[in-house]
Image: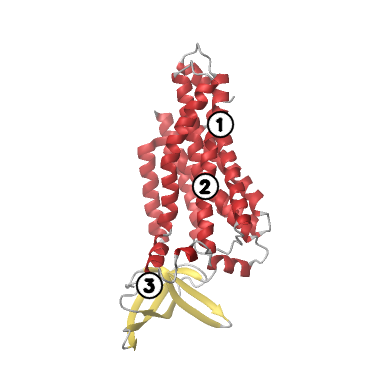
Amino acid sequence: MNTNKKKLAFMLGGLLFMFALLFYVFGGTHDGMYATAVIKSIVLQTELDPDSQEKVYAVDLEFTAGPYSGQTLSTEHFEAPGSAYNLDLTVGQTVLAVADNQEGQLITGIDENYKSGRLLLISTLILFLIAAVAGVNGVKAMLALFFTLIIIFAVMAKLLLHGWPPIPLTILSALVISTINLGVIAGRTKKGVIALIGTVSGVILAGLFGWLAAVLLKLTGYTGHETTYLQLLNAEIDLRGLLISGIIIGALGAVMDVAISISSSLLELSLANPGYDRKKLFESGMNIGRDIIGSMVNTLILAYTGASLTLILLFAIQKEDFPLIKIMNMEFICAEIVRSLAGLFGMVLAIPVTAAVGAWIYSQTTDKSTSRQSVSDSVTIE
């Protein structure tokens, strides 16, 4: 028990360290134009427009980070009654402020409510809840998640900006992410190897489907304002390749879930039923996969639908300007549909691959006359 507690405490410490590292790299304050500041005073100056009732406030900001840390700077802040963009500022509140020296003139302003601190607190509470409920396995899963985030944001993104081809880089990153995640969750076992083979196969097939669909539909990769802005900043970026890379990363989680579920289920079946041969294990794996895919299809489609709910309402309100034939031919709509279909394609084809590999390996390694414990030990990779 003491060993388990030490192991859990060690992993929790590592988890918090990685979270702090991510927060520092992506959410911390650097020597740029953004920095945290505390509101020292708010004074209503005047109403700019009697019709809109828009108001302007004179705000004093005491910067607590960045190049102007310790200094109090003044700025103007505008708010309109009923606007969704109002920040509802109060004295003593911490905000994300802007201080930028442009051609000798210091430009200051208030950008957003400061959310990072509370977000870190909420996330830490969730991590402790997962640790309390799921124990070591839950913490291991969170560690794998942070490894994934570091690979995508700190490694893959930088290499893409340095001109690496998106599709091969994403497949390599998916292989590394799958290996780390399944290694942490399943350990150095044949169950993990089987799930890895199924995951990589499904992800590559999803990427192939996405590439073929992009060619057939003549998708360019321009799916929104952010892609146009990215192209302006870096004209060398392959936007179509980036679209397919996004499809691969988007399919990775769902395909991995299907593969590890089938691999784990087949292991339990082989242990509980030593008389099952390769054909019987494969049939069982396919049956399990069919049940999994029914719920996973809903999960995948609902995830994309939920993310697009605002857009769906916009189309519903302006249905005369956006008939179905217009919607179905919009670039970003087609891209999202292809993204969903590619994920489904990868998940569906990962089922027979995982079932076939699992049936072959488990039928080879299972000794019909051994006990459950000895069989369990036999599937561990030495």
Q: Is residue 100 above or below residue 375?
A: below
Say which residue appears at 48% left-offset and 16% top-offset. 274
Pointer 3 residue: 85
**x then y, percent, for residue 356:** 56, 29
Determine the CA span between mark 2 and mark 3: 35 Å
Q: Quadrant of residue 205?
A: top right
**x then y, percent, for residue 35:** 47, 68
Labelled disc at residue 343: 2
**x then y, percent, for residue 51:** 31, 87
Q: Residues within 10 Å of mark 3 (few under 14, many from 20)?
A: few
Pointer 1 residue: 194
Quick one: label 3 or label 1, which is nearer the N terminus? 3
Determine the secondary structure under disc 1: helix
Q: Is residue 80 above or below residue 4?
A: below
**In the picture provided, is 42 more to the left or to the right than 205?**
left
**From this viewpoint, is residue 38 visible?**
yes
Determine the secondary structure under disc 2: helix
Say which residue appears at 46% left-offset and 40% top-offset. 141
Labelled disc at residue 86: none
Check disc 1 and give the amino acid type: Ile
Please say if the residues under marks 3 and 1 sit with CB atoms less than 8 Å apart: no
Check disc 2 and give the amino acid type: Gly
Quick one: label 2 or label 3, which is nearer the N terminus? 3
Towards the viewer: 54 or 212: 212
